[in-house]
Image: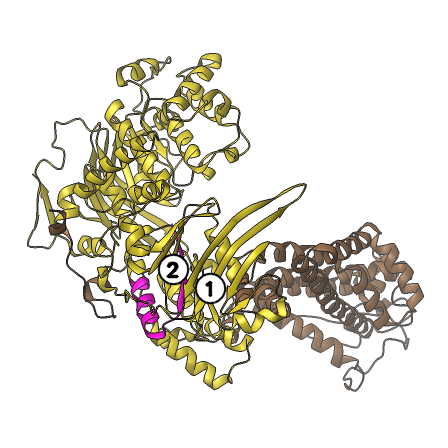
Chain colours: A brown, B yellow
Amino acid sequence: MTDNHRPDEPDPTPVASPVEEAYSVEKPIDLSQKSYSQGQLVRRRFFRHKGAMVSLFVLVFITGMAFTSIGYGIIPSWWDKTFYDAGATVDGGRPTLQLWPFQIGEHPFGQDTIGKDYFALTMRGTQRSLIVAFTVGLLSTVLGTIVGAAAGFYRGWVEAILMRVTDLFIIIPLLVLAAVLGKMAGGGIWSLALVLSLVSWTGLARLVRGEVLSLREREFVTAAEAIGTGSGRVIFKHILPNTIGTIIVSATLTIATTILLESALSFLNFGVRPPDTSLGLLISTYQNAFLTRPWLFWWPGLMILGIALSVNFLGDGLRDAFDPRQNRTAD
Amino acid sequence: MTTTTQSDSGQPVYTGSGTPTGDEEVVLGFSDVDVRFKTEFGSVHAVKGVDLKVRPGEVVALVGESGSGKSVTSMTAMRLLPRNATIGGQVDVAGKEVGRLKEASMRRLRGNDVAMVFQEPMTALNPVLTVGTQVVESMELHGVARGASAWKRAIELLGMVGIPEPERQMKKYPHELSGGQRQRVVIAIAISCDPKVIIADEPTTALDVTVQADILDLLRSLKDKLNTGILLITHNMGVVADMADRVAVMFKGEIVERGTVEEVLLHPNHDYTKMLLGSVPRMGHGRGQMGISVKEEVDADAPLAIELKNLVIEYQRLGKAPFRAVDDVSFDVRQGEIVGLVGESGSGKSTIGRCALGLIPAASGEFQLLGQNITGMKRGDLKPLRKRIGVIFQDPAASLNPRLPIGECIAEPLVVHKVGDRKSRQDKVYELLDAVQLPREVYNRYPHEVSGGQRQRISVARALTLDPELLVADEPTSALDVSVQARVLKIFSDLQEQFGFACLFISHDLAVIDLLAHKVVVLQNGRVVEAGPRQQIMENPQEDYTQRLIAAAPVPDPLEQGRRRRERHELLREQGEEIVELKVDGEQFHQSSQAEVVDVEDVEDVDGTDGPTSR
C-alpha cells in the first residue's frame, strides 16, 4: 500500500516550478542591483570609508607640501628659504604662523637655534621620513610575504630553512643590527631604507606563513590543484589574495614603526646625518630645547603623528575594502 | 484524527487529537513564540509566532530546511539565544515559564527538566576532559549524585546507552571514542538528571547511516521506557518517519503544516510540505524519481575511464607504521558510466577520489586513468591528464575561492590550461551558467553573494568547463538542503546525459546513489565489500555489511519505515548483531536519579541582567 502514498511526480521541466520558487530556501539573486567588477567593488568600498578618506586627504596634503615646498629632484620649490641656510633670528625664532587673523609670516614654523628656517627643515625631514617609511613598507612587505608564503606553502626543508633564518633575525636586537648594517652601508637615505627593510620583514613573514598554512588546507586550494594549477598561480591567485587583510595591516604598522625606528637610529647617529635631516633627527637634536623653544619639538612631532595615524587609518579602510565578506561600509 | 483545513485567510487552522488539548500534561510548550535578532543590518524576524506542545513519552518532530527557525525555536526553551535576540510569547518547560525564571533557576531547569542532544558530539563534548568527568559533572551540578556514587552512576548510565565496557570508557577522552559512542555519551549526559523533555537538535546528521539507525533506536527506547518527551529537530524526512509521533513543518519562521506523522508525510496538505517530500530521493524506488532520469544502459564496449587494480593508498605517520586507507581495491568505470562509491566515514571512498585527482599518490597497485597509469607519475606529466577530469567537492562554501568572482572561478580551468582567449572564455562561462540555470549576471559577483545550492551549481559549472571525460564528485549534495539537493541532482543528471562523461560519484547517501548510479561499489575500512550493477546491489545485496547499510537508510514514509525497521532488527538478529536500546527499566531509572537537593521556589521576577531580553 505504500506505493499509494508516493507524492506526485514533480514537473519534469528543468526550470523550477512556481511552487518550488515560492518555497525555495535559496535567496533569489538580486539582479536589480548593479554588478561590479572586483576592482570597482574594492574602490567603491574604499571611497565610502570616511576615516580612510580623511586620512588619504591628510597624507596627500602632507606629502604634497613636503615635496613641493622646498622641492625634490626635478620638482620645483615655492618656498623661498632652504633647510641649510641660516638667517638672522627674528623674535627669538618664534613661529609666525597665526590662525586668527590668518597670516603665514616670514618663518611660519619658527627658526632653530642658529636661525635656520624651521618650516624648510621640517619639510626636508618629512620628505626623508616619508621616503624611508614607504620604501621600507614596500620592500619589507614584499620580502616578508614571499618568505612567509614560500615557507607555508612548500613546507619541508624550505620552511625549516626560511623560518630558522626568520628566527635568527628576530632574536638579534633590531636596533643593533640596523645600526651595524647602516654603518656598513654608509649614510645614504636609500641604503638606510634597504637596511631597515632587511630587519623588519620578520613579523609579517610569520603572520603570512600562519595564514598560508591554514589556507592551503582549504578545499578551494585543493580544487585548484586538482584542475592542474601550478604552485605559483595557486600561491599568488588563490592563497595570497586571501591574506591581503593581514598583509595590508602589517604593512601600515611597518610604515608607522619605521618612522619611529628611523628617528631612533638618527638619534644614535646611525641614520640620516646632518646637515641633511629627518623628523626623528629634528626631535632628538632639539630635545633639550623643549622647554625654551617647544615648537622645535612640536612641528616634527605633529608630522610624525599625522603620517602614522593617517597611514593606519588608510590600512583600516583598505582592509575593509578588500574583504568582501565584511560589508560594513557598503550601502 | 486531526483535521487540518485552510481557512479563508489562507492560514491553516488546527483542531483534533493530534495537538494536545488544554488539560493534557505538557512537558514542553511553545505558545506564540516570536524571535527577532537585532543585527547591523536591521532586525531579522527568525520565528513568527510558533505554537507547539510536547507531551511526555511523545516525539514531536520540528522539520524544516536551513533558515526555517527550527533551532532558534528550540533554543528559546533553554534560553540559550544570544543577547541580540528579542523573544516574545511564552515557553513552558515542565510547568515553569522559562521567560520569568531567574538565571539560577534557569540553570537548574537546564538538565533537570530539559536537556539537549546536539548535532556534532565532537564539539558538544569538551575535548580536554574525560568522558567520565563530563557525565559526573552534570550530575554533581544538579545534585543528583556526588563523588563516588556519581562515578558509579555514570558507569551505569554509559552501560545503559550501550557503551561496551563502561568502566574503561569513563577514563577516555572524547577523541578516543567513535562518533556513535560520543553521541551515546551525550545522550547519557542528557538523561543523567532524568529530564522530562529532551531537545534533540539534528542528533544524527553528523553520523553514519548505520550509526544513525542505532542512535534512533536508542532515542526511541528512551521515550518508551522513561516516558521522556522528545522535541526532534531535523531536516531528514526519513528520521522523522522513523521517530516522530507528531510533525510540525516550519518554513521561514512559521509552522506551515502540522499533524500526526502519517498525516503529514502521507497526505501532505501544504504546498511546501509536498515539495519537500517530493524532493527526497527514496530508497528502493530507484530511477525516475523527482524527474531525474539516467539512462540505465551503458555501452558495454565503452573504453575504461578508470581502472583500479589492487590499489593501495597509505598515509605516512610520524613514528608509526603508515595507515592503510585503501587496501587492495579493484574496480573500473566505463566512459559514460556513473559509478557510486558508497561507504561510511573512514571507508576510504574520498581517498580514492583524491587519488583519481592526483592529489594523493598510490602506494602500490595500478591506477589507470583514461588509459594511462598514474601511479608514480610526475606532477608535470599529470597536467594534461587533469585537463580531462573535472571535480566537485562537498562544501560549496569552501571549494570556491572567496576572493574570485564567480565568472573567474568558472573560467579558471581555461586559464590554467591556456585554452582560448578572453572573449571565448567569457562566452564559455556564459554558456555554462545557462547550463546550470544561473543568470549570466552572476559573472561578476562573489561566491558569498549567492546561497549554498547556487554555489554548488557554480562548482558543477566549473567542473564541466573543459568538457571533461571524467568527473569526480565527492559528496556533491550532502551539504545541501533537500529541496536544493533535488535541483542540483536534476541539473547534474541532465548534464551527464548531455555530455556523457564518466563519473565517480562518492556518497554516503544510498538513495542518491540508487537514483543516479549505474554501478555501485561498497567500501568498508578501505576494502571493497561488494560491487556490481546498481539493481543487484540495491535490491539483492549479498554481503552482511551491504545488507545492514541498506537496511539502515530511513525512508520518508512512516508505514514503510516501520516495516523496514522491523526487517532491520530481524537482519541484525540473524547476523548476531545487537539491537540498541536503553538497558534499564523505567521505574528503576526514575528512582535512582531522584535529586537529593530539593528545588527552591522557582518562579520569581525576571532577571534582567542575564540572557536575552524578554518582552
Q: Sort mark 1 into few (<14), some (14-19) or many (20+) by Cα contacts within 10 Å.
A: many
Marked residue chain, label 1: B
Q: Amino acid at mark 1?
A: Ile
Image x and y of residue B301, in percent? 38, 70
Task: List the residue tagged with mark 1.
Answer: B306
Image x and y of residue B192, in percent? 38, 23
Q: Quarter of the image for the N terminus of chain B: give it.
A: top left
Residue B472 sits in which quadrant?
Answer: bottom left
Q: Tell which of A143 and B555 is nearer to you.
A: B555
Residue B566 sits in which quadrant?
Answer: top left
Residue A296 visible from this viewpoint: no
Q: Is residue B105 above or below residue B117?
A: above
Q: Extreme front residue here?
A: B301
For residue B390, side relative to residue B551 (left or right):
right
Q: In the image, which residues are magenta?
A: B487-508
Q: Which of the numbered marks, if any, corresponds to residue B160?
A: none
